[in-house]
């Protein structure tokens, strides 16, 4: 499971963090649009609710609770469900990496204090396994208290809110990165969603690790099922149920992700890239990449050159 966690996170390449501290007195409500980053909200004091279409009902967060949005899913935060909201952009128009902000919302009611972070990463580099994570992960205070490193890091972040110290931006990035990684580790162990079950499943997890680390091998459905120690039918059904897509489709996505990285960051010939990601035929690779990306490998590389150019492999 730890190796899979590394494979889940290693390609993300965190590029910076925007973080803010909120002090809001009821009544209040804020609607955040979809962000191209992972989001973390930690409630220091008071309480609030989280609403998003993917959840059947609002989630109540109390002091000491943590919520993570791996994909930056649009959501609403408020002191109570159904509260009228204002756009996040009206309160925080600039949320670029490295920025630090404080937000205060006045009102006659109880106060809620939150620490929020947006961890910016290369969305195109996100592994298929990462994309399969649920839109939101909720960790209550009791779960966090069983994780001293995670809870301690959150406490230090909350207790040292000041942007003027030397190296503060780098410290914030590393601290939020640590919170993010530790929270996902807790999720893999304790939370019960299909893709997290897949990462804990003894057979499916072995096949996932093979797909994400040995994607250049000549895998078939039968050989992946053998890797998992399951029959072909049981493996295919279990993989689709837990991961959300067929095994070979997941393999293709992992191969295309690596091919896109090599096209963007290296000068390797297309034929060499095809070999590296498991294609014996350059034509087959060309067709698969075009179907996956909507453009040919050459078009994708030229687009990367216009945006800054590849580095030599």
Image: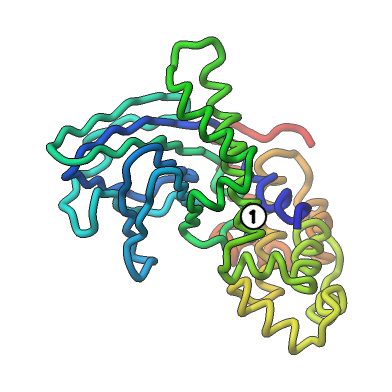
- Judged from the image, the secondary structure of the residue bearing numbered disc 1 is loop
* Residue found at x 57% / y 22%: 170
Residue 260 against residue 312 in the figure, above or below? below
Residue 152 appears in the rendering: yes
On the rendered structure, is 140 left or right of 127? left
Instruction: Please indicate, yes or no, whether residue 301 appears anywhere in the rendered image.
Output: no
State left or right for residue 41 relative to residue 153.
left
Q: Is residue 92 left or right of residue 198?
A: left
Q: Quadrant of residue 212?
A: bottom right
Picture coordinates of residue 127 (x, y %)? 64, 55
Q: Nearer the viewer, residue 132 or 262?
A: 132
Residue sitting at x 74%, y 68% = 284
Name the colour scheme: rainbow
Q: Residue at x 69, y 62 (%)?
A: 286
Residue 76, x across and y down, in percent: 29, 52
Give the residue at x 81% y 63%.
Answer: 210
Q: Residue beneath label 1, please? A: 127
* Observer-nearest of 160 and 7: 160
């Amino acid at each position: 499971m730890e190796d899979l966690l590394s494979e889940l996170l290693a390609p993300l390449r965190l590029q910076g963090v925007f973080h803010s501290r909120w002090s809001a007195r009821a009544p209040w409500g804020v609607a955040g649009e979809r962000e191209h980053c992972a989001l973390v909200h930690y409630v220091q004091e008071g309480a609030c609710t989280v609403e998003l279409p993917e959840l059947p009902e609002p989630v109540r967060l109390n002091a000491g609770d943590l919520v993570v949005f791996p994909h930056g899913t649009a959501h609403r935060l408020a002191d109570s469900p159904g509260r009228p909201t204002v756009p996040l952009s009206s309160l925080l128009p600039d949320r670029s990496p490295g920025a630090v902000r404080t937000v205060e919302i006045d009102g006659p009611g109880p106060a809620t204090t939150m620490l929020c972070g947006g961890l910016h990463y290369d969305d195109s580099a996100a592994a298929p396994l990462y994309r399969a994570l649920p839109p939101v992960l909720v960790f209550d205070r009791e779960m966090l208290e069983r994780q001293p490193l995670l809870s301690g890091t959150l406490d230090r972040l909350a207790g040292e809110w000041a942007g003027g110290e030397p190296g503060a931006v780098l410290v914030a990035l590393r601290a939020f990165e640590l919170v993010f990684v530790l929270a996902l580790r807790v999720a893999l162990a304790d939370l019960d969603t299909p893709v997290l079950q897949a990462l804990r499943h003894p057979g499916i997890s072995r096949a996932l690790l093979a797909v994400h680390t040995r994607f250049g091998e000549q895998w078939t459905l039968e050989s992946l099922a053998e890797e998992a120690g399951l029959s072909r039918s049981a493996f295919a059904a279990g993989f689709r149920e837990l991961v959300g897509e067929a095994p070979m489709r997941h393999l293709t996505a992992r191969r295309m992700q690596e091919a896109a990285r090599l096209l963007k960051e290296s000068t390797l010939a297309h034929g060499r890239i095809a070999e590296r990601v498991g294609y014996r035929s350059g034509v087959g690779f060309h067709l698969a990449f075009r179907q996956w990306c909507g453009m040919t490998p050459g078009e994708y590389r030229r687009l990367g050159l216009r945006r800054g150019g590849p580095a030599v492999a």
